[in-house]
Structures are given as C-alpha cells and as structure tokens.
Amino acid sequence: MSATREEADEFLKQGEYEAAVATYDRVIKLEPDDIYSLFNRATAKEKLELWDEAYDDYDRLVKLRQNVKLAMLGRSRCLFAQEKYEYVVLDMNTLLTGDPKNIEALDLRGRAYTKMGENNKAVDDLTIVIDKEPNNVQALISRGAAYARGRAGSWAIQDFDRALKIEPNLPVAHFNKGMVFFLYSNFTEAAETFDKAIELDPEYAEAYTRRGMSKFESKWHSLEDGCSDFKKAEDLGDELAAAYVKKYCK
C-alpha cells in the first residue's frame, strides 16, 4: 500500500494528475479514510478542473474534521470555479471566524463579493490581501472591478495598471480597464484599450462587442467599424453582439 501511495505522490509531484487520481483511487478503495490520499486526490482533481469531484473529496475531509482549514479553502475554490459565490462567502465566513487573518480566505471571499456586486465588502477584504501580497494580480483585478462598479473609476484604473505592470500580457486587465473608459464615455480610449485585450486574445468575444460599442459611440469611427466587431463577436457566440447585429447591421 505504501508503495502505491508513493507512486501516486510522485505522479502528483510531476503534474501527471490523471495518473495520480487513478492511483489514489486504488489506495482509497482499500483505505476509505486515508486522509492524506483524500486530500491529494482532491488536489489532483482540482488541477484537472473536475470541480464536483474535487469538491466531494474536500467536503469529505471537512466532515471527517481532518485538514479542515485547507479542505475548506479547497472546497471554496471549487465553489468559486462553479460560480457559486454565495456558498464561497458562507464557507469563508466560517473559516475567518476562527482565523480572521487568513489571507487566502479573505482573497476568496473578497473576489466572491466582487462577483456578487458587494463592492464595499470586496474592497475591504481585498485591500487587506493586497497590503500583505502587493503582487497578487487576481486580487488587484477583482478590487479594480469592485471600484469600477462602485463608480470609483480612477481607483479602478490604478489597480488594473498595477496588475498589468506585474503581468503585462493579461487580457482581462486590459478589458476591465477598457470598461472603465467606456463607462465614463471615453470611447476612443476604450476602443484602444480593447484593442490590447484582443491582440492578446483574438478569441475574446466580449472585447470585440465592447470595442464595437465604443466605436459605435465614437465620432472617430463609423457604423461599419462597429458592425465589423459585432459580427466577429457574434461568430464567437456573444449574444449581446448578435442583438446589435440584428438591430444595426445589414
């Protein structure tokens, strides 16, 4: 048994996650409450984006009261990936009650708050995270989004620029920055910023749509310029772009 678990551990270490899961399956079949193997199998499944299965393993550990903090964090990462943000907040509230300075928990809860539109709560959590981890790109992007939704455009731009200074080739940061310009009716700057997102990700459907909307509003572009972007976004499956094509484009 030890040799089999060691094999699974080695697969996990080498990033061979499917092999790791298959080997941990054999271990757990014989020893259902092998805490170490359960946690590592959950980790491998999470890496494979098998969110439901990873969640089940983490949840089992929580119920067994083993590796509870790490298991709750893993469970909430799976919930976040499945866009179940309210449950992320509930889980992290419980964890933070006993460990109020847990940075990963604050990060997860803060990003969940951003997705839920709880902008002030998001900013509060993510500011603590960023003070401790100033190069946390996801926290910067999420706080920037919360600032933007709270109509604090200049603060949002600062966070997106900080994120881009750390990771210049991040399409979502350019996109979010473009959205701030768009919301403040700076349509030319918005279109140019969406350009950068599209250069980095030519399949970024929403960026084409928003660039088309920016061109549609800008005096420097024609209706045809906007429609070209709407049609490209429609081809990529964006429903808002399809509505614009139907209403405005031949």
Image (cartoon, rainbow, N blue to C red):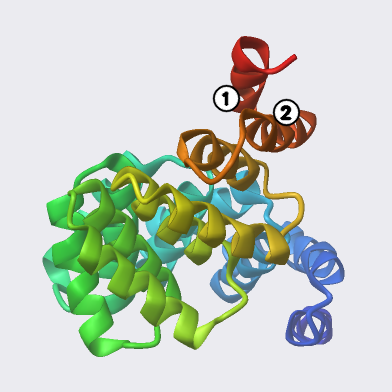
SS at mark 1 in the image: helix
Quarter of the image for residue 177 reads bottom left
At a point 75% along the width and 50% down the height, the residue shown is 203
User: Above or below — where is 129 with respect to 55?
Assistant: below
Specify the amino acid type for callout 1.
Leu
Q: Which residue is mark 1?
A: 240
At a point 28% along the width and 77% down the height, the residue shown is 103
The answer to whether 219 appears left or right of 224 in the picture is left
Between residue 186 and residue 154, name the one nearer to us.
Answer: 186
Specify the amino acid type for callout 2.
Glu
Between residue 7 and residue 129, name the one nearer to us.
Answer: 129
At a point 60% along the width and 11% down the height, the residue shown is 247
Q: Which residue is mark 2?
A: 234
Question: Which disc number belongs to residue 41?
Answer: none
Q: Quadrant of the N terminus?
A: bottom right
Provide residue 54's location: percent of width, then percent of height: 60, 55
Q: Quadrant of the C terminus?
A: top right
Q: Is residue 166 visible?
A: yes
At a point 67% along the width and 42% down the height, the residue shown is 205
Provide residue 220's location: percent of width, then percent of height: 53, 46
Identity of the residue furthest to the front in this view? 220
SS at mark 2 in the image: helix
The answer to whether 71 appears left or right of 108 in the picture is right
User: Above or below — where is 131 with respect to 204?
Assistant: below
Label 2, label 1: how far apart the Cα atoms are:
8 Å
- Which mark sits nearer the N-terminus, 2 or 1? 2
